[in-house]
Image (tube, rainbow, N blue to C red):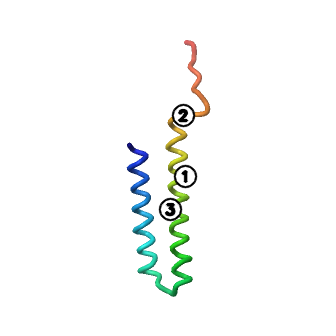
Amino acid sequence: MGFLITTIIFFLAGFVASCLALICCNRGPSTNLFHVTLVITATICCWMMWAIVYLAQMKPLINPILSGE
């Protein structure tokens, strides 16, 4: 459930940031497209980094070695 909720939060944050980029940096159609593309790319990269770290904790590659004391 945590993965889905946080994915929705990232989607909403990307949507809000894209709208703010359009409102605050209105300098023409090609510049607006560039700004929105940068915001969407940054949002996807942040989500992918979070998702990789989150999923890596579920099935670690290295198992802990227990001491035999």
Mark 2 lies on a secondary structure that is: loop
Amino acid type for the residue under numbered disc 2: Lys
Q: Residue at x 51, y 48 (%)?
A: 51
CA–CA distance in space, label 1 to label 3: 10 Å
Mark 1 lies on a secondary structure that is: helix
User: Could you tell whether 8 is left or right of 42 in the image?
Assistant: left
Quadrant containing the C terminus in the rendered view: top right
- Tell me the tag on residue 59: 2
* Percent position of residue 64, x then y: 57, 26
Kindly check if marks 2 and 1 are in contact, taking CB atoms under 8 A apart as contact. Answer: no
Residue at label 1? Answer: 49
* Percent position of residue 3, x then y: 43, 46
Amino acid type for the residue under numbered disc 1: Met
Label 2 vs 1, first from the N-terminus: 1
* Percent position of residue 7, x then y: 43, 53
Mark 3 lies on a secondary structure that is: helix
In the image, is residue 12 above or below residue 56? below
- Tell me the tag on residue 16: none
